[in-house]
Amino acid sequence: MSNMIRVGMADYKLCRPPQRISTLGLGSCLGVVLYDQRTKICGLAHVMMPDSTSIRKNTNRMKFVDTCLNDMLEELLKNGARKDNIIAKIAGGAQMFMSHNAHNILNIGQQNTEAVHRLLEEWKIPVIAEDVGNNYGRTIEFDPTTGELLIRSIGIGDTVI
C-alpha cells in the first residue's frame, strides 16, 4: 500500500504511475480528479465549499472549488501536464441531510458540483465521468495507469468510472 497517496479533506495532491491516489469520506464534499491522459500525471482535490469569495476570513484555499482547483491546475502544468490533454472525473456532492425545503439553499453538495462544472467549462476541461448527488458518502481511488476512478459507497457497492 506504499503506492497509495492519501488526500485529506480540504487538500489536493499530485500523483503519477505506479502510485494511486485516494480520498475518504466524501459526503457533500467533492473529489475532483484532473488527469493528463498523455503524461499520466493527475491531481486529486477534496473540496468542501463552492466559492472562496463568499467567506471573509478564509485561511485555507484548499477548502474551496475555485482556489483549490486553480492551485492544483497550476501545479499540474508546472509538472508537465498540458491543459488540452486534461480530462476530469468527479465524485461526491451528496445531499447528506434531507430537508423539506424544495429550494434547499443548504445543499452544499449540489453547489459544489455546479461550481466545478462552471469552472472546468470555463477552462475547457471536459468532465468525462461523474458519480455525484444522492444521499450517501463515497470513498474514491484513482489509478493514473488505467485512468479508472473506483468509487466505494457503503450499502451501494463499488463502481468504476
Image (cartoon, rainbow, N blue to C red):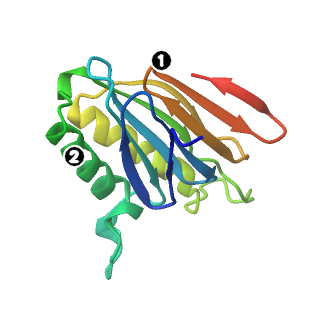
Q: Quadrant of the N terminus?
A: top right
Residue 67 vs 1, above or below: the answer is below
Callout 2 amino acid: Glu
Residue 144 vs 72, above or below: the answer is above
Given residues 98 and 101, the one toward you in this image is 98
Callout 1 amino acid: Thr
Residue 75: numbered disc: 2
Lateral position of residue 104 relative to residue 32, left or right:
right
Residue 5: numbered disc: none
> Which residue shows up at 32% across the image and 82% down it?
57
Query: Which residue ends up furthest to the right in the rendered image?
Result: 155
Residue 146: numbered disc: 1
**Cα distance in 3D space between marks 2 and 1:** 22 Å
> Which residue shows up at 32% across the image and 19% down it?
37
Position of residue 122 measured from the top left corner of the image (x, y, whole percent): 23, 36
Position of residue 100 measured from the top left corner of the image (x, y, whole percent): 75, 59
Query: Which residue ends up furthest to the bottom in the rendered image?
Result: 57
Q: Residues within 10 Å of mark 2 (few under 14, many from 20)?
A: some
Given residues 34 and 102, the one toward you in this image is 34
**Residue 16 occupies which quadrant of the picture?**
top left
> Callout 1: helix, strand or loop?
loop
Q: Quadrant of the C terminus?
A: top right
Residue 148 vs 153, above or below: the answer is above
> Which residue shows up at 43% across the image and 26% down it?
144
**Residue 152 occupies which quadrant of the picture?**
top right
